[in-house]
Amino acid sequence: MAETIVSEATSLFFPILLLSSIIFLTLKHFKSYFLSKTSLPLPPGPTPWPILGNIPHMGKKPHVTLANFARSYGPLMSLRIGTQTMVIGSSISAAVEILKTHDRVLSARSVPHAFPAKSPKLNHVSVGWALECNDRWKHVRTICRTELFSAKAMESQACLRDKKVSEMVEFLNGKEGEKVKVGEVVFATVFNVLSNALISSDFMRFEKEIVDRGLKDLLGEYMEVTGAPNLSDFYPILGALDLQGLNKNAMEVFRRVCATWDPIIEDRREGRRGNASSQKDFLDALIDNSCTNDQINYLLLELFAAGTDSSSNTIEWAMAELIKSPESMKKVREEMTREIKQDLLKESHLPHLHYLQACFKETLRLHPPAPLLVPRRALDSCKVMNYAIPKNSLVLVNVWAIGRDPVIWEDPLKFKPERFLNSTLDFKGNDFEFLPFGAGRRICPALPLAAKNFPFILASLIHYFEWSLPHGNDPDELDMNEKVAITLQKELPLVLIPKVKK
């Protein structure tokens, strides 16, 4: 009996202690929140709830919620997410101040607790999630830029991209008249392009007319776990407790994913290259820079997670938009007939396919891969648009909202590639009305690869095949609902039927 009473008392004590800690911490933060409004005003925003702050307001599509809030509270607003202050910019002027004027002080990261990059031994080898843009971060980014994304690297990988896209086309030839999940096929292609650049190996296969989903599912599981709402992110004092088990689960998936290429790393350290070419690759560069296996594993996983899901989602969105817009699809085909004729499509054709490039840009405007970019953190307090941004605030830019702003864009919700034909707007971080890859220090380092990969794969799907919806469904009724799982995805996968062009 005594043991039962003690057990029950213990089971009650810890929740009460936890709740008391949260209330104390929240009241402390709210006190500083309201005091700051009397001295250095925070941006306006919706009234936060006690303890929870604005968490209940966010919903499943935070980019949409925040865009709606911006109509009421203005282009720069603040919310409370648990005990954290979050500042969101939703206009060109806000984006300029966050990503350019105050880029240095707003260039830090607040790394989610479930990410392995929280570990000090991994943080300094991260490209996207390094806590600060310090010398080590610059060094790793330089390795990535030189070995993967420089003009020289892009040129040396051109034959590789041709080969992997040809394998995709060959696979689709065997699927003529059958239903195809476009996103899965594109994902495997993008993954193999990247894996060959990184480790000189294929990791996904087209076999027996089925896409090997093993690694794709593992990566999806990793992104789902690390992107799940986490109490430790809302209330950092709880971080060490891992109450939802997300950190434990993320580390387990991390180990399972990395087991895929662990043997290759060990072989490479021993001087055995297996089937890899004799030309040095990114893995060799990391080994030459004295990176440990854990550091190599994390950086490879980060590059795969960031580079494959966003790429395949964007191409899937582009195909969906073109299926819904037969006039635009017709213009793409006419351009290809004129510029390529019956020849095999090569990357060298891409600069001449102006309408296709416009479709690519229009897709990125409507469906940016990261609608809120990757959250930044304020290294120090600063003032943006006459409002105070407190130190350690989360700072986001809603590029999804900017891309659909009727003040900037005519018919903003319409897929209209023509708007880019006679426009100098580009996505390289200098035009703040169009920022699908971000800007400033934290601009996506893989932008040069994306600029090659996206249009080449999209052009190949259109050049070699006619596409239709199953059961003769009306393109106007194609579901275009979206969901956010770190990246912006179609809620329902795009399923199409290919017909080989004669």
Image (cartoon, helix red, strand yellow):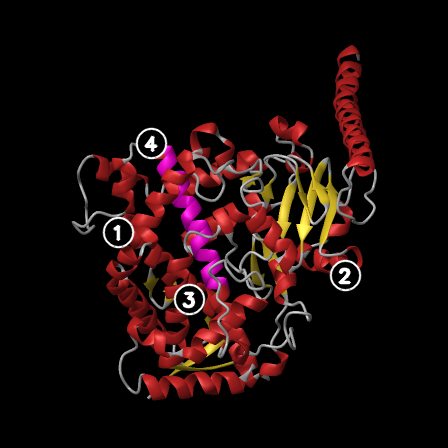
Question: Which badge, 2 or 1, is on the more N-terminal residue?
Answer: 2
Label 1: which secondary element: loop
Q: Which one is closest to the eye, mark 2 or mark 1?
A: 2
Q: Where is residue 57 in the image (x, y as percent from the top left)?
A: 77, 50
The residue carrying mark 4 is: 292
Mark 4 vs 1: CB contact within 8 A: no
The amino acid pointed to by label 1 is: Ser
In the drawing, what numbered circle is on residue 71? 2
Q: Distance between the residues labelled 4 and 1?
A: 19 Å
- Residue 311 located within the stretch drawn in magenta: yes
Q: Which one is closest to the eye, mark 1 or mark 3?
A: 3
In the drawing, what numbered circle is on residue 454? 3
Q: Which one is closest to the eye, mark 3 or mark 2?
A: 2
Q: Which one is closest to the eye, mark 2 or mark 4?
A: 2
The amino acid pointed to by label 4 is: Thr
Mark yes or no: residue 495 visible.
no
The residue carrying mark 1 is: 200
Looking at the rendering, which quadrant does residue 284 occupy?
top left
The amino acid pointed to by label 2 is: Arg
Q: Height in image: 302 above or below 333?
A: above
Question: Which badge, 3 or 2, is on the more N-terminal residue?
Answer: 2
Measuring 61% from the left and 66% from the top, which residue is drawn there?
A: 403
Label 3: which secondary element: helix
Q: Where is residue 241 in the image (x, y as percent from the top left)?
A: 63, 27
